Image (tube, helix red, strand yellow):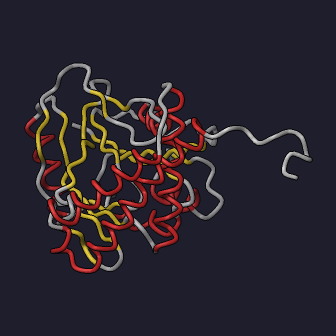
Amino acid sequence: MSIAAVLIVKNEQAHLRACLEALSWADEIVILDAGSQDGSQEIAREFTDKVVVNDDWQGFGVQRQRAEALVESEWILMVDADERVTPALRESIQAALDEGTQAIYTLPRLSWCFGAFIRHSGWYPDRVARLYPRGRAGYDDALVHEKLRNPHALPVKPLEGDLLHFTYRDLRHYLEKSAHYAEAWAEQRVARGKRGSLADGLLHGVGCFVRMYLLKAGFLDGRQGLLLALLSAHSTFAKYADLWVRTRTPAPPQDASAGH
């Protein structure tokens, strides 16, 4: 069974080489670049001749669909540039392919964040469906938080061995990504005719903190666990605040004298 490692990237120079080195065993590597302005495309071409640039960004889901369409192998392993396939996971993937069962496989993802691997807080094992037979499953077209669709009701099976995830470089990177996701989430909700309130944001934000830090034992992750719970609560509130601003606040006045 042939397998393609598939990545969608943009300005991932800091991570890409290490990611691709851990995928050198794949039969095919497919990289869809969204218009990188760093050295990502040059690094990608060191590992594969299947590097395609498409900067018509329509969201993560659509970009993954475009990448899927470039694959020739029988199986797809979808990987992000800030992730690393460990040797143990590679062995588990190869064993699954040797078995030959048409299924969707989930990978346990272990994230490094703010100086530590996060093993609690609801972050581990963060199982993600990433290995699937081409043409039998594929991603939806969501702007963000895209999901792998299973139209043929394939069995879903777990793999062993961690997919390492080097998620945030620093606090600014976290806040920038959080703002981007909040904006995309709010846009999706507005398109569906949904409305938001600050009360919703406050309720969900507090709930997020309690769930991560107490119910999911984030306190066992030390100071990183506390910081993540606080930041996640803030990010959750920001999503609903963005939706409230878009749907409940009036447009600015056109009359320049209106503020006097």
Residue 145 image point, x, y percent: 39, 42
Q: Residue at x 53, y 42 (%)?
A: 244
Q: Nearer the viewer, residue 157 or 145?
A: 145
- The number of numbered discs placed on residues in the rendered structure image is 0
From the viewer's perspective, is residue 183 above or below residue 194? below
Residue 7 shown left or right of residue 23 in the figure: right
- Picture quarter containing residue 217? bottom left
Q: In which quadrant of the rendered image does the N terminus lie?
A: top left
- Residue reaching furthest front? 260
Residue 236 image point, x, y percent: 40, 53
From the viewer's perspective, is residue 241 above or below residue 167? above
Residue 112 image point, x, y percent: 30, 70
Q: Nearer the viewer, residue 217 or 78?
A: 217
Q: Nearer the viewer, residue 164 or 238?
A: 238
Q: Residue at x 22, y 19 (%)?
A: 152
Q: Residue at x 23, y 57 (%)?
A: 109
From the viewer's perspective, is residue 50 above or below residue 153? below
- Residue reaching furthest left? 99
- Residue reaching furthest top? 152
- Picture quarter containing residue 222? bottom left
Residue 28 image point, x, y percent: 37, 45
Q: Residue at x 18, y 73 (%)?
A: 219
From the viewer's perspective, is residue 231 above or below residue 237? below
- Picture quarter containing residue 245? top right
Q: Nearer the viewer, residue 165 or 254?
A: 254
Residue 56 shown left or right of residue 27 in the figure: right
